[in-house]
Amino acid sequence: MITDHLSFEGKVAIITGGATGIGYATALQLAKLGADVAIASRTAAELDDAAARIAAESGRRCIAVPTDVKDEDAVIALVARTVAELGRIDVLINNAGGTRMGPLESIPTKGWDSIFDLNVKSAYVATREAGRHMVAQRSGAIVSISSGAGINGVKGGAHYSAAKSALQMFTRVTAAEWGKYGVRANCVAAGAIASPRVLAAWKVAGLQPDEMGAAIPLRRTGTPDEMANMIVFLASDAASYVTGQTIAVDGGPALGGIPDA
């Protein structure tokens, strides 16, 4: 039974960007399935509140580690503190990411580098540091959060599309190199997921969720919990023979051809 392989009892997970949205939904699910979790984000007060709620709802340990994932030393400290307080690392969720949109001709070099630092370098450093423990114990699961932009590209996001595509290839190579150690690595590419921060960004841009959902085959936007479902599956033993993949959670493909009636 698949449910026999969804337990995280005795396991420890790190979730970056874990205070809100997809990261919070994932951390809560992992904790409810038995994991002790470390959540990281930049805002300490928001992080402490999220950790308290996760611990209260799950009965598991949840430590809050304020972390700017663009700071290499901070990511190294996140991994070290997790091991020191929770004893091991079995799951790493590279969820922190984001972008500021803009036309290619106006993206400054600093802006390009910043998006790569946030979406790619942070995942590399976290994977490298957590991976040392996973390789030593000969087991572990890494799930990195990509985007449909990394698969299909998006105009106004050349830097973001390139970064998410790089994250997907980094994941693929990690899977190929570390499979011999029992370490799996996968990506989940998010579509239009209506997390609180995404909803706020859509509002600023004058976009409505109903309008966004109209162009999606399932005729709606997704939820953080629906992303978390896939992330948790890939982190679990139920996905023990799945590695090096990028799986889209996007409500279906947008195709040309005969228009809908």
Image: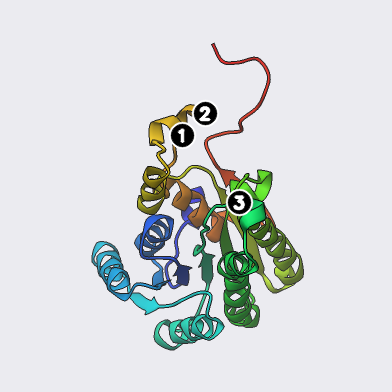
Q: SS class of the residue under badge 2?
A: loop
Q: Give the residue pinned by disc 3.
A: 157
Above or below residue 72? Residue 149 is: above
Q: Which mark is residue 215?
A: 2
Residue 246: image x %, image y %? 65, 51
Q: SS class of the residue under badge 1?
A: helix
Residue 185: image x %, image y %? 64, 63
Above or below residue 164? Residue 93 is: below
Q: Give the residue pinned by disc 1.
A: 212
Q: Tag 2: Cα neighbours inside 10 Å, few (<14), some, or many (≥20)?
A: some
Disc on the earlier residue, 3 or 2: 3
Location of the C terminus (image quadrant): top right
Towards the viewer: 14 or 196: 196
The residues bearing labels 3 and 2 have C-alpha atoms spaced at a distance of 20 Å
Tell me the residue at 33%/74% (across/down): 61
The residues bearing labels 1 and 3 have C-alpha atoms spaced at a distance of 18 Å
Tell me the residue at 54%/40% (across/down): 250
Q: Amino acid at mark 1?
A: Met
Q: Amino acid at mark 2?
A: Ala
Q: Specify the farthest residue to the top.
A: 261
Q: How is the image coloured?
A: rainbow
Residue 204: image x %, image y %? 38, 46
The residues bearing labels 1 and 2 have C-alpha atoms spaced at a distance of 6 Å
Let me know if residue 240 appears in the view.
Answer: no
Let me know if residue 86 appears in the view.
Answer: yes
Towards the viewer: 48 or 204: 204
Q: Amino acid at mark 3?
A: Gly
Above or below residue 39? Residue 21 is: above
Towards the viewer: 62 or 2: 62
Residue 51: image x %, image y %? 30, 70
Q: SS class of the residue under badge 3?
A: loop
